[in-house]
Amino acid sequence: MEALLHQLMAGFATGGIYASLALALVMIYQATHLVNFAQGEMAMFSTYLAWSLINAGMPYWLAFVLTVAISFLIGVFIERVVIRPVESAPVLAVVTVFIALLVILNSLAGWIYTYTIKSFPSPFPPGMALGRFMSPHEVGAIGVTLVVLAALYAFFRFTPLGLAMRAAAQNPASSRLVGIRVGWMLALGWGLAAAVGAVAGMMVAPIVYLDPNMMGGILLYAFAAALLGGIDSPMGAVIGGFVVGVLENVLGAFVIGNELKLSVALVLIIGVLLVRPSGFFGKVHVTRV
Amino acid sequence: MLLEANNLTAGYGQTRVLHGVDFAIEKGSITALLGANGAGKTTTLRALCGMVKTGGEIRFEGRRIDRAATEDIVRLGVAHVPDGRGTFLTLSVEENLRLGAYSRRDRQAVGEDLERVLGYFPVLRERRRQQAGTLSGGEQQMLAVSRGLMLKPKLMLLDEPSFGLAPLLVRELFSILRAIREREGVSMMLVEQNAAMALELADHAYLIETGRVVLQGSSKELKSNDAVRRSYLGY
């Protein structure tokens, strides 16, 4: 019983991280109707950035904030320079760009930081333990995730800029007619997604350690989470993230073993696509013939 | 003159739709743009807002806007109520209205204007928190007009506001438009297939056929023109 509870809690902690990354995927998807395959590598790169800053002697939280800010700018930059030119290109071309971005960021990180696995500090020291079932980092990661989610919710729900971003994703033509600069809203969306990804990267790095391939599996879980909730539903992505996190941990510990954990994500992806392609909270798309 | 277009051309890709039209909108007036399907009425409005590729010259309050981006033209005070209504379907009625005021600088006044605009359309007030996609066609048309009003525009471009509305609703909408012109002093350019209603409301009208202005004059003149009467008014 205690072991199960422990796995459940651990699942919540990693689930929060999947939820963040899934939310980043959904944000890009809502604006472009494409899944950004490079989202994980962008997060990985941000995490290396944080590692550099911390290693240079910067206090953790300062490095954290700076990394989030820089990641935001990198996200905006990537949209403006790499994605914008292929805006109206065929889907396959854009997907190719995403994959190129994935490979480039991965190799770049390997080239700069080498492929040696590094440890990444947690800002939550062992003394901070709250319960028997969770490590301090797990508690902290959940806290940070919840703060990020709440901030995003408030931003999109209550600010004029957040409203404009939702409008631009929903109806670009109409948005221009009320004066919204739709191109910049997309760039802003990329910036936010990159920032959220950076937080996810920094929260997961103490668990999986830092190496250029660290986000490969995590992106798969996040993708499964986003699909489970419905790829166009932010709330669905968050719930999906926690569900996937818990499933992964519990099934991995008691049913299928650690080696097959990643297959949980793959089975979920295929299962959702087969049975309910719009996920649990997504819109069912109907096209008029 | 609030707006002047000289030798305005526009088209989509290789196809030219407007072959050099001239018109002007007087400050505080309602100008109707009449014509059959495919004459180029919608394209004219789109050209004014920089939504299609244009040639020729457009001046708004004396300033050239024919090269400007749509978003910047909106900021000058031109509200376009598009065909198809342009509703933000997944957002609430109130959010739709607030978006109309997005480019305004005086954010504090928006709440007050929201109440004033809802005063014209009580149906929308009742449905304020409702998702806009659930509104009926007529309500979405009212929402589109209200969203345009939220800009506090100098000029409103209305693309077939009567399209798909029941006759009674058309009458109601047009009387509201008349009230808006009187109380807010907004100039309007109205594109309509319902020529009778449009001439009733407008001061001045242009008739376009296949991308050219073939007739213009005061509404009174056009109403009594035999060709207009036979082809567009049907009596």
Image (cartoon, rainbow, N blue to C red):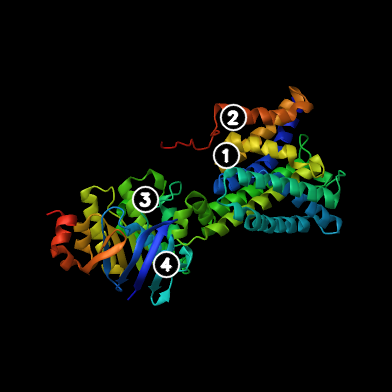
Q: Give the residue at x 49% y 49%.
A: A170
> Could you say which disc has been placed on residue B84 in the image?
3
Q: Residue furthest left?
A: B235
Chain letter of the residue beneath label 4 in the structure image: B
Q: Residue furthest right?
A: A116
Select label 1 or label 3 by which is in front: 3
Mark 2 lies on residue: A272
Residue carrying label 1 = A231
| Identity of the residue furthest to the top in this view | A255
Would residue A9 appear left or right of B50 to someone viewing this image? right
Amino acid type, residue under disc 2 in the picture: Val
Residue highlighted by disc 4: B55
Of the residues shown, which amino acid type is indicated by label 3? Gly
Q: Residues within 10 Å of mark 3 (few under 14, many from 20)?
A: some
Residue type, numbered disc 4: Gly
Q: Residues within 10 Å of mark 2 (few under 14, many from 20)?
A: some
The local secondary structure at tag 2 comes to: helix
Q: Mark 2 vs mark 1: same chain?
A: yes
User: Dot 1, how many residues are within 10 Å of its Cα: few (below 14), some (14-19), or many (20+)?
Assistant: many
Q: Are marks 1 and 3 on the same chain?
A: no
Q: Looking at the rendered structure, which numbered label has been put on residue B181? A: none
Distance (Cα) linking label 2 and label 1: 11 Å
Question: Which image quarter holds the N terminus of chain A?
Answer: top right
Residue B78 coordinates in the image, percent (x, y): 39, 66
Identify the chain of the residue marked 2, using the numbered disc in the image. A
Front: mark 3 or 2:
3
- Classify mark 4: residues with Cα within 10 Å, few (<14), some (14-19) or many (20+): some
Image quadrant in which the C terminus of chain A is located: top left
Pick whichever of labels 3 and 4 is earlier in the sequence: 4
Q: Quadrant of residue B181?
A: bottom left
